Amino acid sequence: MNACVDLPRSLLRPGAGARPGRVYLVGAGPGDPDLLTLRAARLLAQAEVVVLDQLVSAEVQALIAPRAQVIDAGKQRQRHTMEQDEINALLVRLARQGRQVVRLKGGDPFVFGRGGEEAQALAEAGIEFEVVPGITAACGVSAYAGIPLTHRDHAQSCSFVTGHVKEGGPEPDWAALAQPQQTLVIYMGLAALPRICTQLAAHGLSPETPAAVVQQGTTAAQRVVTGTLADLAARVQAAGLRSPCLTIVGEVVRLREQLAWFEPAPVLSAACA
Ligand code: SAH
């Protein structure tokens, strides 16, 4: 018998049925369900099993097929409900059962979303996967806050950085971040906001540089607090903003005065929106 006969791939997978499992790493965007891609909306409508990220808005979750099994793998700072290794193992296990798995992640899966790590785990396990990009918070939130990330008069470049620096871990390159004519978008930076503002000013940005923090951008609960590097942290604390928040630093923040267009539905505590 010819040993090189090609077996169907499904037969080569341990535990797989006739149909091979597949994982879709899907970006859910920043919150407003209208910002989903058509591909994401279609996959949600047909989903068999959805593994959820903590950041996926209720309005997006409402678009998941009612028959789908939903597994919440949400994570919060210092309150991990499932470790990343467990999530990777879960995705592999579900796919090996021959299931079509939607791994739904806030924003874009490949921007601070650990989508890269999940894709690596799937590739190493020989599981087929697909990546569906989403609107990352920087793009969605800045648009709904009326803050263009670049502008010919104010910013020729834009950096997306994480503000979640590990205790005792390597420091960000503050000097590189503190450049004029550049917009900084800081993800996960709420807890470290006072330090971030102080360090940027210490490394050369004017303390008067405009900056904003946007809570739950693109949703009815969007709140925006603006200020300068010198006073933003105190204003944000006084306003009681809560995660998820995105920080934007740079001259472009001033344009919000003219360009703010999105009026979230009034909420009781919106005193400083
Ligand atoms: N993959 C996601 C980012 C995950 S990291 C993306 O591409 O957007 C989580 C951080 O994203 C939060 O701490 C916050 O900084 C930011 N974020 C995500 N959604 C947000 C929203 N609707 N409003 C403000 N910040 C948001």
Image (spheres, grey):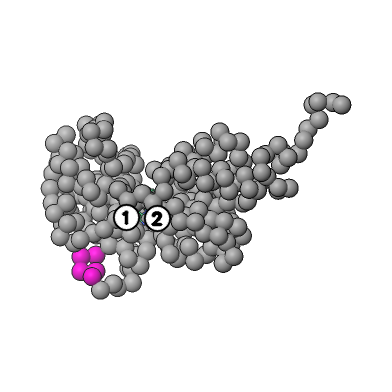
Q: Residue at x 35, y 67 (%)?
A: 220
Tell me the magenta residue range.
Answer: 269-273
Q: Which mark is residue 55?
A: 2
| Amino acid under disc 2 | Leu
Query: From the Cβ of disc 2, is ligand 1 less than 8 Å away?
Result: yes
In contact (CB < 8 Å): disc 1 and disc 2: yes
Q: Residue at x 43, y 57 (%)?
A: 56
Relative to 34, 242 lies left or right: left
Label 2 crowding class (10 Å Cα cut-off): few <14, some 14-19, many 20+? many
Membership of 148 in magenta stretch: no
Please say whether residue 208 is visible from this viewpoint: no
Q: How many marks?
A: 2
Considering every residue shown, the one lying at the far right of the view is: 1
Residue 110 position within the rendered picture, expressed as x and y whole percent measured from the top left:
45, 42
Relative to 42, 259 lies left or right: left
- The residue beneath circle 1 is 244
Residue 49 position within the rendered picture, expressed as x and y whole percent measured from the top left:
57, 56
Near-viewer residue (201 or 25): 25
Residue 48 position within the rendered picture, expressed as x and y whole percent measured from the top left:
60, 57
